[in-house]
Image: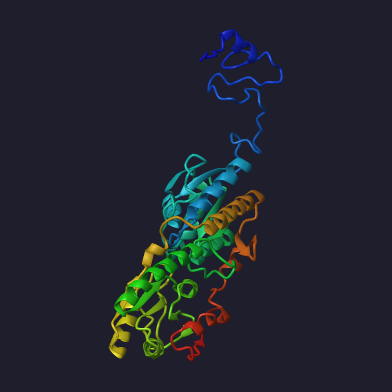
């Protein structure tokens, strides 16, 4: 068998390896990499020069974390820097970072590889600058000291409420990006992180069904939702819950016990009850410790424990509580939330470049638009009665007609 080899003269004639090409139509190879790509290929110039930044933008995340925050940060920086030529500064721990002038570098290198990461690389806190006198003035002064031309605030009603006040009362340009897994901001149809939380809760219900059925138990599953029962309703429907308790709907423990008893009478010796963390019975005391924005600290409420205990006392059926808690906030966002977060962050970067301050991005139908921040946080978005009614026929006692508050 004859092995054919190429001489150096042949390589030079044909342009292989490092020899000059005799073929004028064949591009030269890059001698630094030895890969087959043209040395003289045209390079598309950037839209804006990164060496001449137009604005210096601060970015912060406030309130509870949720899947998708890093995707927003990535989009704000990518579009702001690559498209508009802006520079960015990360403000750590929400508004607390601005009060203390705590910042971190934020550019293309520090935001690469974070699309699928949960949490926030900027950290977060529930800090209200207006809790103490002079907080607003200090935020505005520190922003000036840090050389910030504008701030992109990513958060829920409290974080965005602060951004709205700083924009209107202290002339600090702000653009808002709505964030809450509770999905209770009225200005947007959905917020990123919500559907990931629903996925997590639904998977938990699927797993709990098998263990509940194996031991003839009633399992009361507590999910997040301070004022609105979006996660409870959606995960309850998707996960086949036998009763759903949410803040918007008044129910007594008797209603729940009737549902469980009716299932037992039909031979269904287990039940799954989903309850929002913010649900209260009519006789419950609403007082208790609050955070800096005046919200009751629900971590000390233990509504699932209480419901499970009352069911066992009144029916005699073994009942246990399961609190999903912060597992709903953690981990990577699903595909829908990654895309929505990227769309939100991209539009926020464009709004900054266009000078449209005091506004926030929002999802209306399938379109991402911008609205005044004050409009977006003006009202609490609760579950529509007709949405909750979808779940009612699947309760253990279908005849119950809940009174909607």
**Which residue occupies the foreground of this view, 153 or 361?**
361
Drawn side of residue 400 relative to residue 357, left or right = left
Q: Residue at x 66, y 33 (%)?
A: 45
Q: Residue at x 64, y 48 (%)?
A: 353
Q: Is residue 297 visible in this depiction of the protein? A: no
Drawn side of residue 77 relative to residue 350, left or right = left
Residue at the top extreme of this rendering: 9
Q: Residue at x 42, y 72 (%)?
A: 295
Spot occupied by residue 173 in the image (x, y as percentages of width and height): 58, 54
Image quadrant where residue 35 sits: top right
Spot occupied by residue 143 in the image (x, y as percentages of width and height): 51, 50
Name above or below for residue 333 compared with residue 56.
Answer: below
**Which residue occupies the foreground of this view, 176 or 275?**
275
Q: How many numbered tags mark residues here? A: 0
Spot occupied by residue 328 in the image (x, y as percentages of width and height): 41, 64
**Which residue occupies the foreground of this view, 180 or 372?**
180
Q: Residue at x 61, y 10 (%)?
A: 10
**Which residue occupies the foreground of this view, 18 or 249?**
18
Q: How is the image coloured?
A: rainbow
Residue at the right extreme of this rendering: 25
Q: Is residue 358 visible in this depiction of the protein? A: yes
């Amino acid at each position: 068998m004859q092995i054919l080899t190429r001489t150096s003269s042949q390589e030079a004639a044909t342009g292989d390896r490092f020899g000059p090409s005799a073929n004028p139509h064949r591009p030269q190879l890059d001698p630094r990499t030895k890969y087959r790509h043209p040395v003289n290929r045209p390079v598309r110039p950037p839209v804006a020069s990164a060496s001449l930044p137009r604005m210096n933008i601060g970015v912060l995340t406030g309130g509870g974390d949720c899947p998708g925050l890093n995707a927003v940060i990535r989009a704000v920086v990518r579009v702001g820097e690559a498209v508009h030529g802006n520079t960015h500064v990360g403000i750590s721990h929400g508004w607390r970072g601005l009060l203390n002038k705590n910042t971190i570098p934020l550019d293309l290198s520090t935001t690469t590889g974070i699309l699928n990461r949960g949490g926030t690389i900027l950290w977060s806190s529930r800090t209200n600058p207006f809790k103490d006198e002079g907080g607003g003035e200090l935020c505005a002064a520190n922003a000036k000291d840090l050389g910030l031309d504008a701030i992109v605030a990513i958060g829920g009603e409290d974080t965005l409420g602060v951004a709205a006040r700083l924009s209107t009362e202290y002339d600090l340009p702000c653009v808002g990006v709505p964030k809450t897994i509770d999905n209770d901001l009225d200005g947007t149809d959905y917020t990123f992180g919500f559907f990931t939380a629903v996925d997590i809760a639904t998977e938990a219900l699927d797993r709990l069904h098998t263990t509940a059925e194996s031991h003839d138990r009633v399992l009361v599953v507590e999910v997040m939702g301070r004022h609105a029962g979006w996660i409870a309703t959606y995960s309850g429907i998707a996960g086949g819950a036998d009763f759903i308790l949410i803040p918007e709907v008044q129910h007594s423990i008797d209603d729940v016990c009737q549902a469980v008893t009716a299932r037992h009478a039909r031979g269904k010796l287990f039940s799954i009850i989903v309850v929002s963390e913010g649900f209260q019975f009519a006789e419950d005391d609403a007082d208790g410790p609050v955070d800096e924005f005046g919200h009751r600290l629900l971590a000390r409420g233990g509504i699932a424990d209480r419901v499970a205990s009352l069911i066992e006392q009144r029916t005699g059926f073994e009942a246990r509580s399961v609190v999903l808690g912060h597992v709903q906030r953690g981990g990577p966002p699903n595909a829908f939330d990654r895309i929505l977060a990227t769309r939100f962050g991209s539009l926020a970067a464009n709004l900054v470049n266009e000078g449209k301050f005091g506004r926030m991005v929002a999802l209306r139908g399938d379109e991402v638009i911008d609205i005044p921040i004050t409009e977006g946080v003006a009202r609490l978005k609760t579950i529509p009665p007709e949405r909750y009614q979808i779940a009612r026929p699947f309760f253990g006692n279908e005849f119950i007609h809940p009174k909607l508050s």
